Amino acid sequence: MPGPGRGLSARLLVLTIAFVMLGEVLIYVPSISRYRLVYLQERLAASHEATLTLQASPDGMISPELERELLKHARVRSIALRMPDASYLMLGKPPPVDAAFDLHDATPPELIRDAFVALAQTRNRVLRVIGPARVDPGVRVDVTLDEAPMVGEMFDYSGRILLLSIVLSLLTASLVFLSLHWLIVRPMRRITESLVAFREDPEDASRGIVASGRGDEIGVAEREFAEMQRGLRAALKQRARLAALGAAVGKINHDLRNILSSAVLASGRLAHSDDPKVKRQAPALTTAIDRAVALCEDILNFARAGDPEPRRGRVDLAALVDDVGKVLALPDDGSISWRNEVAKGFTVTADRDQLFRVIFNLGRNAVEAIDGQGEVRVGARRDAAATAIEVADTGRGFSVEARDHLFEPFAGSTRPGGAGLGLPIAREIMQAHGGDLCLAKSDAEGTVFRLEFPPE
Ligand SMILES: Nc1ncnc2c1ncn2[C@@H]1O[C@H](COP(=O)(O)OP(=O)(O)OP(=O)(O)O)[C@@H](O)[C@H]1O
Ligand SMILES: [Mg+2]
């Protein structure tokens, strides 16, 4: 199990905090610029109100004290008002300005930029701000003011937002964290623990996962996992049984071959017996024993076929087919011919011994399927998609039951003394080469098997 701080929960916690903070930043940027805009608009509105006093005085003049008082109240340095009829009103004397802003046509990106420029100032600037009067948009208000008080308020506001974000993100993060922990992390941990326990001791049924019956994806995962554990456990038991059986068959086979070799010796002696009756029976006995030996060999081959990875090399196919023809027990009278139609120099990438076994098995089956006269042809061709070898015979074709159990070990044989292993082994070998073996055709005229190799 991952240690504290490295598990799913800790990562989720950090991620949630980071995302909420990011969200807060995205909210902060426009809101600080809005804060500055509202501040400036309020100054304009207050300035407009201040000039009302001036408009009320009969001669348009007020005392310097009142003027100072009004400007202080509006928190500006000077005010200039342009009325709709183009007349002017002034309060105070405008100082030299550092920057001017017209609120009539400020776009949001400009407002954001100006807000951050203001936050970055280290000294007080005098600003000139022009905008419409709030109550009377026809009136243009033009004021000068100090920037420092505004920046101070903006910093206060930012501090409050920061504090709020921290509180919010911690709160959201803990809620998200708790619910995720409850919904995902805890069940995930249960599954992980069960996986680990299962790997340590797959046969201990008490340590398997118990599905919680949830309806969501985790529930499905739990049920599937429990099902998989059951299946695997059964397969493991089966495998142990089969392994024991395999070992027993191996031993029996070994003993049987010793017994058979004494039988071969004895039958050899019988052939030289003086008793003509005994002498007549001897060849039948020898054939029977030979069949038994071949059967033992087949079973051993099958047991061996499961393991070896093919040791691939370039195989001269024409030479290999010739070799198979020599080993096949073809009748002496020449009634069955073995025709090698593979072009000279044709090669395939394969394990030579294994490929030999495949073609030998197919060849032996073909010879056995031919009654009387016939021929077996082996050909090969290669195109862009694949390399294929075909073994075709003019035999009697597949019987229905042999076809029903095609490629099934021990089940497909219709031949007395046949183990029913030739085709399954051949196919297994082809699949280990990344190819396949298939029955291309089989009818009363004959049978064609096709060996397919992956493209080279
Ligand atoms: N070329 C063929 N023509 C007709 N039937 C065939 C041919 N090849 C195989 N069969 C049928 O398929 C069955 C299974 O063949 P397979 O080679 O698997 O086993 P087998 O030949 O009976 O025994 P062994 O394990 O000794 O090879 C055969 O018994 C036969 O009935
Ligand atoms: Mg066979």
Image: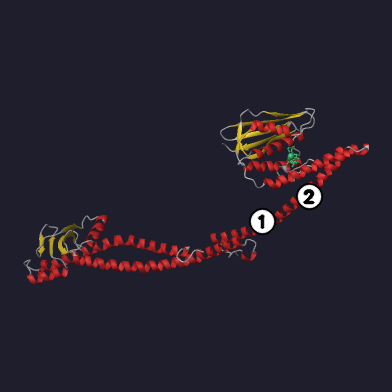
Asked which quadrant contains residue 26, the reply is bottom left
Q: Percent from the top left, x then y, of residue 380?
A: 64, 31
Amino acid type at mark 1 = Ala
Q: Percent from the top left, x then y, of residue 447?
A: 71, 34
Determine whether label 1 and label 2 are within 8 Å by CB: no
Q: Percent from the top left, x then y, of residue 392?
A: 70, 32
Q: Residues within 10 Å of mark 1 (few under 14, many from 20)?
A: few
Q: CA distance from mark 1 to mark 2?
A: 30 Å
Q: Which element is circle 2 on?
A: helix
Asked which quadrant contains residue 229, the reply is bottom right
Q: How is the image coloured?
A: secondary structure
Asked which quadrant contains residue 393, the reply is top right
- Residue 443 position (above or below residue 171): above
Which quadrant would the C terminus be assigned to in this image?
A: top right
Q: Which residue was labeled with disc 2?
A: 255
Tell me the residue at 74%/36% (across/down): 364
Q: Which residue was labeled with disc 1?
A: 235
> Is the residue marked 2 within 8 Å of ligand 1, measured from its CB?
no
Q: Which element is circle 1 on?
A: helix
Q: Which one is nearer the viewer's eye here, 190 or 105?
A: 190
Q: Percent from the top left, x then y, of residue 291?
A: 80, 41
